Image (cartoon, coloured by chain):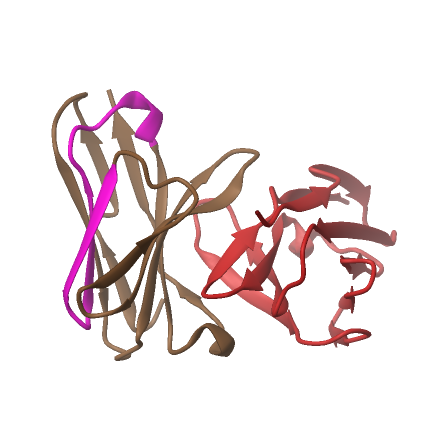
């Protein structure tokens, strides 16, 4: 999507290794979110950020950490990947929660 | 904790038929969104419903919101193959969206 880029698009990693996913925006939006998508569960919120260095947990935050050192970048880290973290990860941005959300193209992560 | 339930989870329909997808949610919300997702793609925003009784229409899709019943519907009129996709409702409360499980729609010629 215009203004929001996720990297990498695909990744295969081994159990127990650390993994970092990056979300980059050029819209200068205040809010950024990480969701995971699994069949039958829709999208579930992992963590979100409401400003530089301001983050909070979502519904499924265990095993994940995030960082936001500048407005444009929101990093999601799996400290020690597990097979249950195999999923498609989406980043979203919003100027405020009342102005709608724009989603990135997603990162497909496979933990073997 | 906000819960959002969609049904049906899977819908196979013939072209030209009408059908409705239902989205129930458990607590008061700020607004409700409908998204479309094609396989392997991101989410495309379809509708944002802001208040009780809100109705929005775009082509063959019409969404409505009943905040008293905590129910939103997505009605499909005279379905065509191009509408085949997965549809999600999402409820906004506070600073975040909570999604339903999605409805996979398959429209057969």
Location of the C terminus of chain B by quadrant is top right
Any part of residue A81 in sight: yes
Whether residue A108 is in magenta: the answer is no
The residue located at (25%, 56%) in the rendering is A6
Q: In the image, is A59 to the left or to the right of B103?
A: left
Which chain shows up in brown? A
The residue located at (48%, 78%) in the rendering is A99
Who is closer to the viewer here, B29 or B101?
B29
User: What range is drawn magenta here?
Assistant: A64-86
Q: Considering only vertical position in the picture, is B76 above or below A79?
A: below
Where in the figure is residue B95, as x and y percent of width and height? 45, 65
Any part of residue A105 in sight: no
The residue located at (41%, 77%) in the rendering is A96
Q: Considering only vertical position in the picture, is B48 above or below B8?
A: below
Q: Considering only vertical position in the picture, is B48 above or below A14?
A: below
Whether residue A71 is in magenta: the answer is yes
Q: Which of the 4 image quadrants contains residue A13? A: top left
Color used for chain B? red
Q: How many marks?
A: 0
Where in the figure is residue A100, as x and y percent of width and height? 49, 73
Q: Considering only vertical position in the picture, is B77 above or below A64?
A: below
Give the residue furthest to the right.
Answer: B17
Who is closer to the viewer here, B12 or A33?
A33
Where in the figure is residue B3, as x and y percent of width and height? 62, 46
Q: In the image, is A76 to the left or to the right of B73?
A: left
The residue located at (77%, 67%) in the rendering is B65
Where in the figure is residue A42, as x and y percent of width and height? 53, 43
């Amino acid at each position: 999507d215009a203004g929001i880029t996720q990297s990498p698009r695909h990744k295969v990693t081994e159990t127990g290794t650390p993994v970092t996913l990056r979300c980059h925006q050029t819209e200068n939006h205040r809010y950024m979110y990480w969701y995971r998508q699994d069949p039958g569960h829709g999208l579930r919120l992992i963590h979100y950020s409401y400003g530089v260095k301001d983050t909070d947990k979502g519904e499924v935050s265990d095993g994940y950490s995030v960082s936001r050192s500048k407005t444009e970048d929101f990093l999601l880290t799996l400290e020690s990947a597990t097979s249950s973290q195999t999923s498609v990860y989406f980043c979203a941005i919003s100027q405020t929660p009342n102005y709608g959300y724009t989603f990135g193209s997603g990162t497909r992560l496979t933990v073997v | 904790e906000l819960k959002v339930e969609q049904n049906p989870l899977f819908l196979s329909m013939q072209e030209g038929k009408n059908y409705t997808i239902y989205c129930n949610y458990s607590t008061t919300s700020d607004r409700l969104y409908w998204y479309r997702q094609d396989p392997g793609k991101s989410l495309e925003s379809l509708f944002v419903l802001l208040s009780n009784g809100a109705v929005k229409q775009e082509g063959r899709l019409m969404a409505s919101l009943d905040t008293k019943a905590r129910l939103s519907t997505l009605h499909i009129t005279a379905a065509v193959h191009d509408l085949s996709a997965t549809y999600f409702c999402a409820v906004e409360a506070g600073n975040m969206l909570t999604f339903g499980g999605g409805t996979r729609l398959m429209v057969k010629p």
